[in-house]
Amino acid sequence: MKQALLITTLLVCIVFVIGIILGNSWNSGQTEISKTLKQSELYTESFLVEQELFESFETNCALAEKRLSSLSDELWKMGKILGAQNAKQELGEENYNFLKRKYHLMQIRTYVLDKKLQQDCGIKTNIILFYFKQDDTLSEQQGKILDELVEQYPLHVFAIEYQYSKELEFLEDYYEIKNTPTLVVNFEKALPGLNTKEQLIPLLHG
């Protein structure tokens, strides 16, 4: 019951936040990252429509897993682009902040879809929500540990900058995130502080 409430609450919040963020439109030219973001957003929307359709029929779990995996890969690539040292300079501060907020929101949306897929299909892909801060030594160490785990386990990591934007704090409030780094492994309670591989591996599937 609590998990169903989480999904419903997050989806409502996400739709609301999208409306807020889209209200802050900008007039810059098309860049590689904005094109990628738009494409990923369309992909996410089509996935949502597909899932709504399957609610009336039998869910095609194999197709849903494949599409969600592709979306996660796209978000990972986009995160690397936004994380580049010259990203803010190339995009301009206003556009950069807009794109980063929207990117974080898309990560949260994909996180919710992952949860729904696990409930509907019993798929055991590991999901980690990673809250970090810029120029934070412990956050950097945690990121390196997660990179190592990604190479060894079926694992999706959603890295979100802590308190980056007011519009995105609803999930921080839900998990009671208070500091960084903090991890949420497979939708369970938040794990504050630096978590080692030895601490995390027993919490993963497979």
Image (cartoon, rainbow, N blue to C red):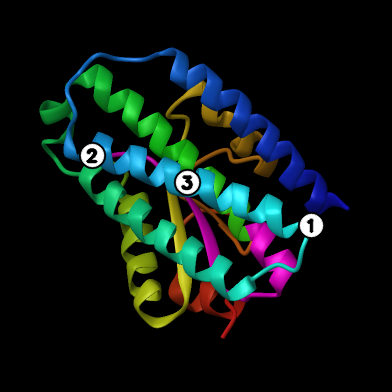
From mark 1 to mark 2, how far is it between C-alphas? Answer: 35 Å
Whichever of labels 1 and 2 marks the residue nearer the N terminus, that label is 2
Q: Residues within 10 Å of mark 2 (few under 14, many from 20)?
A: some
From mark 1 to mark 3, how far is it between C-alphas? Answer: 26 Å
Residue 125: within the magenta? yes
Mark 3 highlights which residue?
Answer: 107
Which of the image's four quarters has the C terminus? bottom right
Q: Position of residue 120 (x, y in %)?
A: 74, 66
Whichever of labels 1 and 3 marks the residue nearer the N terminus, that label is 1
* Magenta span: 115-134
Q: Position of residue 95 (x, y in %)?
A: 26, 22
Mark 1 highlights which residue?
Answer: 56
Of 172 and 199, nearer the camera is 172
Mark 2 highlights which residue?
Answer: 33
Q: In this rendering, which labeled residue sits more in front, label 1 or label 2?
A: 1
Q: Give the image quarter of residue 161.
A: top left
Three-letter amino acid code at disc 3?
Gln
From mark 2 to mark 3, how far is it between C-alphas? Answer: 15 Å
Q: Give the image quarter of residue 152.
A: bottom left
Three-letter amino acid code at disc 2?
Ile
Three-letter amino acid code at disc 1?
Ser
User: Under tag 3, what secondary structure?
Assistant: helix
